Image: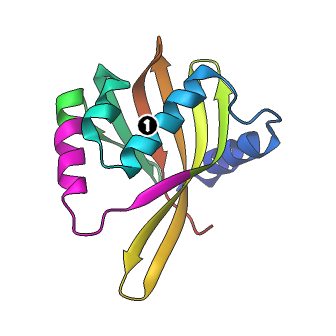
Amino acid sequence: MNWKILATLILFVSLAAQAGSGSRADVVRQFVEHYNSADTEAMLLLCTEDVQWLSILDNTVSVETENSQALREALTAHFSRPVPARSELTETVEAGSKVITVEKAFRQTDAGEKSQCSVAVYEFNENKISHVWYFDSYEC
């Protein structure tokens, strides 16, 4: 993992005085709320048709989905799991056309609830999410 990039993003989020008071941050909050409700269609209404979902692991960027139909299929499969995860935003900062977050994800295991954090960057085209980059998770 490129720790310098992750550390820079976390530092930027931590030092921001105003944690997400603008409209784009509100859209990201709604997106996460719809995720927690497993409401795929409501999530997609907040995205552009050509939304891209990317993950960054180590030094590799992977395109997970390239449009809203692919995202719909991925979310449908994800939400069909017996015990889907839930997520909360612990930090949110607007930076131009992007919203940078620290997201804490929770999931149930046989040993109880587990959590992990990840930095995510949401890019907007107008007022809709056009790209999401998820960085490798870490213990939080």
Tell me the quarter of the image containing the C terminus.
bottom right
Using the image, determine if residue 62 lies above or below residue 18: below
In front of the other: 53 or 108: 108
**Place of residue 70 in the rendered image (x, y in percent of width and height, measured from the top left):** 18, 35
In front of the other: 49 or 38: 38
> Residue at the spot x=72%, y=42% of the render?
13
**Place of residue 128 in the rendered image (x, y in percent of width and height, measured from the top left):** 42, 19
Camera sees residue 67: no
Q: Is residue 85 magenta?
A: yes
Image quadrant assignment for residue 73: top left
In front of the other: 102 or 29: 29
Which residues fall within the magenta stretch?
71-88
> Residue at the spot x=29%, y=42% of the render?
39
User: Would residue 114 be found to the left or right of residue 8 on screen?
Assistant: left
Image quadrant assignment for residue 48: top left
For the image, the number of numbered tags is: 1
**Place of residue 35 in the rendered image (x, y in percent of width and height, measured from the top left):** 37, 46
Using the image, determine if residue 74 lies above or below residue 16: below
Q: Which residue is mark 1?
A: 31
User: Would residue 33 be found to the left or right of residue 18 on screen?
Assistant: left
Disc 1 crowd rating (10 Å Cα; few below 14, some 14-19, many 20+) is many
For the residue marked with disc 1, what is the amino acid?
Answer: Phe
Camera sees residue 49: yes
Using the image, determine if residue 109 lies above or below residue 3: below
> Residue at the spot x=77%, y=46% of the render?
14
> Residue at the spot x=66%, y=24% of the render?
95
Residue that sits furthest to the top in the current view: 126
